[in-house]
Amino acid sequence: MQLTALLEAHGITRVVLSPGSRNAPLIHSFVGDSDFTCYSVVDERSAGFFALGVAQAEKQPVAVCCTSGTAVLNLGPAVAEAYYQGLPLLVITADRPQAWIGQMDGQTIPQEKIFGTIVRHSVQLPEVKDAEEEWHCNRLINEAILAIDDGGSFGPAHINISLSEPLFSFNCEQLPKVRIIRRPRTTCTLPQDVVEDYFVRFRQSERKMIIVGQLPPGHELTESLQKLAEKQRVVILVDRLSNLPAGPLDRFDALLRTVGEKEMQALAPELVITLGGHLTSKRLKQFIRKTEIRELWHLTPTGDVSDTFQKVTDLIRCTPASFLQQLAAAPVYKTGNEFQKAWLNTAATITLPDASYSDLAVTGSFLQQLPENATLHLGNSNSAYLTQLFDLPVGVKLFCNRGTNGIEGSLSTAVGYAAASGQLTFLLIGDMSFFYDMNALWNRHLSPNLRILLNNNSGGGIFHTLPGLNRSEALNDYVSTAHNTEAGRWAEQQGFRVLTAHNSEELLQQLPLFMNQEGIQPVLLEVFTSMEENRKVIASYYEQLKKFRI
């Protein structure tokens, strides 16, 4: 009961529960307390990602609770995603008594510290028999909860609980009074003399660039970045997943795919400032890694060493928004704009795709009709890459599991977000990601506001676009794993309204029905395309951009 009381005291009142007998006492405690909002998700892998969606929607820590044994291992992918995306996830795992580990007892594996280095903190709770063990238990739970939010920097933590039988003697009618350990949030503020030194070094660079990776919606960077671009002539490259408004350099990935070596030299920066999480563009990473730059500053609230471009000279431990605000407010000295002009002139040659029926065309049509201020989740791989090529309507909030770039839980995360937010939630996903995570639709929390656009090209279509791999004899059967599976019947069985499209005309007919905000059930639009046609269309788009420059 210490655990339940402390979760409530710390404001962690949303819990995703997977069934089991060893965790039945925990389930009983959460479900029996009206202050908790509980979600039931049978598949633990799906449950973990569902919890991430709830955390994104609520902007609050969320707990996920499972039984002992391999159930715990199934939470691993979601824990890794939470760690690398910086999401506040508390993993609560029921365990057998420690004496029975390795004794061939059912559902018994070594669970203590099972997630290794992909959690911020892991504790093994003692089975409380006296006052000292109760104090110890209280302290450990507080430690784990505090690790989730380290001064505004988030991540997962793990509580493992050994529970002895009898498990089902539910006799506690109210929560005990517990000691709460709090840690006030601190702001990362640089000393003024350090800030001034960076200002001097900033002004000394003519060719300045800021790169912004994945960020959650609601940050305060837009105004500062606009000022830096307009007054300081800084080149601003923002990943689509940064949740920043569209700008003239948004399609920088297409630009870097199609420029020649001479143009590359004109686009090379002297000073690069990076912030945010992961970047979708592999081309940008390769470009900066090969470029001889003078300095690279990485703005990080944690101070952790992150050297994505292999060029870091300064890890600036600060709140990125406050640092950029100070930088944008600094006096403007004479600065050339040839570097920024080179980028803008080159970017002006990058046109929006105008493609025949394919995944590329479907993505463009879908994004064009997406309502303003909607929430959009992206499956990994092709869905994330193609979205980079198009503009988004105003105010769209964008999410994607790019912490680890895995395909395991994109569907579950979107389902969890829709369930918790009650808002119109769209998911653009490919067939491999969808079918891999089909159990995401096997729960009682499907929101009528959920809209899934499934690009079904009968396999892992992106693998057919990778140079070299597309010549492999093993490509179809073992890499892209061609298939003839359809999602419609499974989705209908779970209560979805199912729409299908096999060509441009059908797609245009179905999109208004798909976008309808007044529906009383979730909607799946399954769009069927050809892997071979998809490959030709995307190759043709980049070839046309190259020809335009010649």
Image: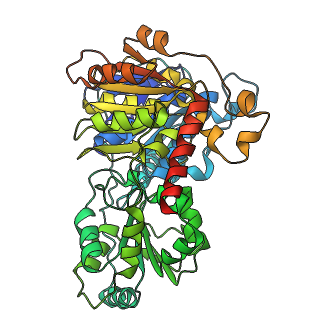
Name the colour scheme.
Answer: rainbow
Is residue 284 found left or right of 33 in the rendered image? right
User: With respect to residue 448, does 402 lie above or below?
Assistant: below
- Residue nearest the viewer, comparing 549 with 422: 549
Q: Residue furthest left?
A: 518
The location of residue 127, given as percent across then percent down, is 53, 37
Answer yes or no: is residue 133 visible: no
- Residue nearest the viewer, comparing 22 with 139: 22
Answer yes or no: is residue 220 visible: yes
Q: Quadrant of residue 470?
A: top right
- Name which residue lies at 28% across and 55% down: 245
Is residue 462 found left or right of 335 in the rendered image? right
The location of residue 224, given as percent across then percent down, is 25, 70
* Placement of the N terminus among the 4 image quadrants: top left
Is residue 417 found left or right of 464 in the rendered image? left
Is residue 243 found left or right of 430 in the rendered image? left
The location of residue 296, given as percent across then percent down, is 49, 77
- Name which residue lies at 37% across and 72% down: 235
User: With respect to residue 23, does 543 lie above or below?
Assistant: below
Q: Quadrant of residue 519?
A: top left
- Residue nearest the viewer, comparing 91 with 141: 91
Q: Quadrant of residue 283?
A: bottom right
- Name which residue lies at 67% across and 32% down: 480
- Name which residue lies at 29% across and 62% down: 184
